[in-house]
């Protein structure tokens, strides 16, 4: 049990040192929590289960730092991500931004739970901090990564040693795709021809039985322009085959 945070203290005296609010100090509450593997039990014993004040009547959610609607101190961005910008994903890994934002990626946005199932349950999910791999991050590919199309098997796999993903719909495990194995934070894995077409030349034309038409815009005009630029990322890598303005159901 962490002895740095008091349990039901006598409020007649000083409960915390002045360092509790100073981010650069070793006694900052965020650093104390990190050393206890983010066990909020002691905090909640005084400030309430929902951090709304408890018997101290001092709410963590009215401090100007934590937002109740995001989960208060249990918000994803408290421990990883960008606290100032309220961004949940870790901003130190470029691939997170590519997968989770339209402006930085080449296709539809995926959610955290596609790779981290415990994200659906938030902080209190049993596989979050209390999972079978407490020293690492739980990665179990599902959702869009496991999308099956004709002739494919949705069996995505993550190699924690190589930091690579294989057999994912997102990187070519689909009809006429290349089924590429990609490395996390790799910088050359999203060019045209990588997931479908010819990776050597960048020609995105898939092999037969795809029609031998060089211009993508003729059939996929809502997705790309005449120069092969993606014009609507929500219609690219989205689990669908968007052709002539509709979705092919036989893919």
Image (tube, rainbow, N blue to C red):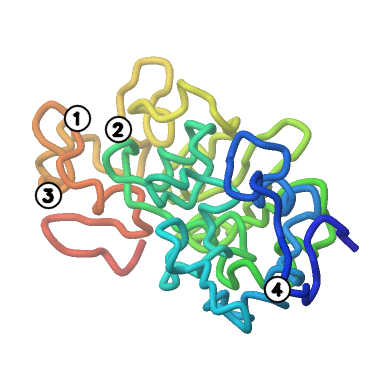
Which residue corresponds to mark 3? 222
Q: Report how far apart the C-alphas of labels 4 and 2 lie in the structure.
A: 71 Å
Is 136 on the left-hand or right-hand side of 96? right
Depicted 212 relative to depicted 243: above or below? above
Mark 4 or mark 3, which is nearer the start of the sequence?
A: 4
| Image depth: mark 2 or mark 3 in front | 3
Q: Report how far apart the C-alphas of labels 1 and 4 lie in the structure.
A: 75 Å
Residue farthest to the front, as pictured: 12
At a point 40% along the width and 30% down the height, the residue shown is 190
Rendered image quadrant of residue 103:
top left
Q: Which mark is residue 200?
A: none
Q: Mark 4 packing: few (<14 Cα in 10 Å), some, or many (20+)?
A: few
| Image depth: mark 3 or mark 4 in front | 4
Residue 28: x %, y % from top left: 66, 45
Mark 3 or mark 2, which is nearer the start of the sequence?
A: 2
Residue 129: x %, y % from top left: 75, 61
Q: Mark 3 packing: few (<14 Cα in 10 Å), some, or many (20+)?
A: some
Residue 37: x %, y % from top left: 78, 54
Which residue corresponds to mark 2? 205
Which residue corresponds to mark 4? 11
């Amino acid at each position: 049990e962490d002895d740095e945070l008091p349990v039901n203290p006598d409020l007649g005296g000083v409960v915390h040192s002045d360092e509790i609010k100073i981010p650069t100090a070793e006694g900052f509450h965020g650093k104390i929590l990190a050393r206890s593997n983010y066990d909020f039990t002691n905090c909640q014993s005084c400030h309430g289960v929902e951090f709304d004040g408890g018997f101290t009547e001092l709410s963590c959610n009215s401090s100007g730092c934590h937002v109740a609607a995001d989960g208060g101190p249990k918000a994803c961005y408290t421990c990883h991500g960008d606290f100032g910008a309220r961004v949940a994903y870790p901003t130190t890994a470029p691939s997170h931004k590519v997968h989770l934002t339209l402006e930085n990626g080449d296709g539809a946005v995926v959610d955290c739970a596609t790779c981290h199932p415990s994200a659906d349950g938030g902080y209190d999910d049993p596989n979050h901090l209390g999972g079978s791999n407490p020293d690492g991050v739980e990665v179990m590919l599902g959702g869009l990564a496991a999308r099956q199309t004709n002739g494919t098997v949705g069996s995505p796999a993550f190699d924690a040693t190589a930091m690579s993903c294989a057999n994912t719909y997102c990187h070519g495990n689909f009809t006429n795709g290349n089924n590429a194995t990609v490395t996390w934070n790799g910088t050359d894995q999203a060019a045209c021809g990588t997931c479908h077409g010819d990776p050597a030349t960048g020609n995105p034309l898939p092999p037969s039985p795809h029609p031998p038409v060089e211009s993508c815009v003729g059939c996929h005009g809502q997705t790309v322009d005449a120069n092969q630029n993606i014009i609507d990322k929500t219609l690219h890598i989205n689990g669908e085959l968007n052709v002539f303005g509709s979705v092919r159901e036989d893919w």
